[in-house]
Amino acid sequence: MTLRKATGLILLAAGAWALLAPQANLGLPELRWMARSIFPGEALVGIALLVVSQFLLGRVPDRNVAEEQVLPKRAGS
Amino acid sequence: MGNEKQQANRIGWGPRLWRLAKAAASLPLPVKVLSLLALGLTLGILFPNSSFVRAIYLSGTYFPRTIVTLAALLVFQLLTAATAKLILYHKERAGRLFARILALYAVMGVVSLIYAAGWLAVFSGLPLFLPDVPLPTPIEWFKQIGTTLVTIFSQQPLLQALGGGILAGWLTASIPALHRAAHGFIAAGDLILTGFRKILWYYPIMIGCLAIGIPLKFGNRGLALYGECAFWDMIVICAWCLAMILFCKVVTKRSWGQILAYYGSVWPTGFGTGGSYDTLAVNLVSAEKDLGLRPETAEISIVFGTVLNKNCATMSVLIVTVIVARLLSIPISLFELALLIPPVAILGFETPGIPGGAGYFMSPILAVLLHVPNPALWVTTFVSMYSGLIPMFSTAGNTTDDGVVGALLEDCFNDGRALPSEAALHNESAVGAR
């Protein structure tokens, strides 16, 4: 695993936590403990972290390969 | 003959039950949903004090509650992916054409919600404003809307996710240096939607479990309100579809025969399947064959509509909101209903096309917007109410509206520009498939 990928995964986890925690009070009772340490604007911080993490983890697919992968075969073809 | 009977009798209960379960699993999804809904309601009526029945009901609440916990993350990922996909795959290829079709669906979404709110004003007898709240002047009214929206967007994580999703999708897809992030979001969004499709088998079971709660918690009043909700939904959506047929005849060049043949084949299919994606093939074929659209127009409007257009589902969401508010004794007025129109219209674009998906994704946000004291109860009640006949009427309306938009596009907004290639459209259909 590269440093870039590891950093991306850590930021992804942190971003997901920051988006989930403020909402945790409303959902599963078993996960309400996540909302104990929330701070104002935490969801916005989570959004920023997720954008950075996807920048580190995502990759632009090769156009031809991508189209081959997503093009469904038409009936009769 | 006698030997065959003896052999049949020798088959134990285990294999018989296994065969029965296999036969039940092969039934169409709407049949399973309606059967388990009826079974759940019956169990709730007959055994309200049974601890076993109560445990079954409780098991059904876990999935919607999990979705509520994950809602902000899911809404953000899905909306970012949808926005990025739209800009990356279509902006440059079809420019104005896609802007037009997007604008048509957006306008239809808002008009549908205003139309549904109008019906609700007639049906529900909701007051214009809540009692003990003084009537505001027009300036105060706009200020009140603005303040409410600013407060909500600055303090509510779900709505921050909603706004942030659109912004992040637009930014990452528009700035070439950030395309990596856009593709990351698209891949994550596709992963989430694949996950949803894989757990679709659980949906009828969950609806059956949650249906127990309606008579269990709300007695006959809950049952009566579900019936009322389905009845309102039927009237609102059927009247909308009739209006769309007339609109199509008056505004476009389609003949009565073409319009009725299209509605005759697509409406019952949408109603029967209860899912836009299950209706996609029939809708595409019928839009070309019956409605007489050019293949490229049909593919654009139907594929785009299947992905984006949930206008009838948003109408149903508004109706279910009023019914659930009444059931849980949450005060609501037409003013609150009007405030719900913009967020519900936006949510309509990112609702996943799974049956009842609008219920899962919109109910937590509606709970926030309406300041519901017990959001968990709101969500479970909402999901159980938004089931059975209601998503079926919604899908029938959503899918046929796609054809009307196609006719409108071809007859009224076609300036002779080149349409995008078929491959590009199939690319969209596969990438956007939910």
Image (cartoon, rainbow, N blue to C red):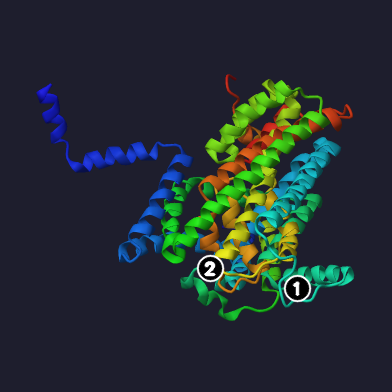
| B321, B329: nearer the viewer | B329
Quadrant location of the C terminus of chain A in the rendered image: top right
Crowding near the residue tagged with mark 2, few <14, some 14–19, many ≥20 C-alpha atoms within 10 Å = many
Crowding near the residue tagged with mark 1, few <14, some 14–19, many ≥20 C-alpha atoms within 10 Å = few
Tell me if residue B323 can be seen.
Answer: yes
Q: Position of residue B160 (x, y in %)?
A: 71, 66
SS at badge 2: helix
Q: Is residue A13 placed above or below B174 in the rendered structure? A: below
Residue B395 position by quadrant = top right
Quadrant location of the N terminus of chain A in the rendered image: bottom right
Q: Which residue is mark 2?
A: B376
Q: Position of residue B72 (x, y in %)?
A: 63, 63
Which chain is indicated by disc 1? B
| B428, B178: nearer the viewer | B428
Q: Which of marks 2 and 1 precedes in the sequence?
A: 1
Residue B104 position by quadrant = top right
SS at badge 1: helix
Which chain is indicated by disc 2? B
Tell me if residue B178 can be seen.
Answer: no
| A66, A22: nearer the viewer | A22
Q: CA distance from mark 1 to mark 2?
A: 22 Å
Q: Position of residue B57 (x, y in %)?
A: 40, 61
Left/right of residue A46 with respect to residue B205 in the rendered view: right
Q: Position of residue B414 (x, y in %)?
A: 86, 30
Q: Which residue is mark 1?
A: B151
In percent of the image, x 70 and y 29: which residue is there? B423
What's the amino acid at mark 2? Ala
Q: Is residue A43 placed above or below B341 in the rendered structure? A: below
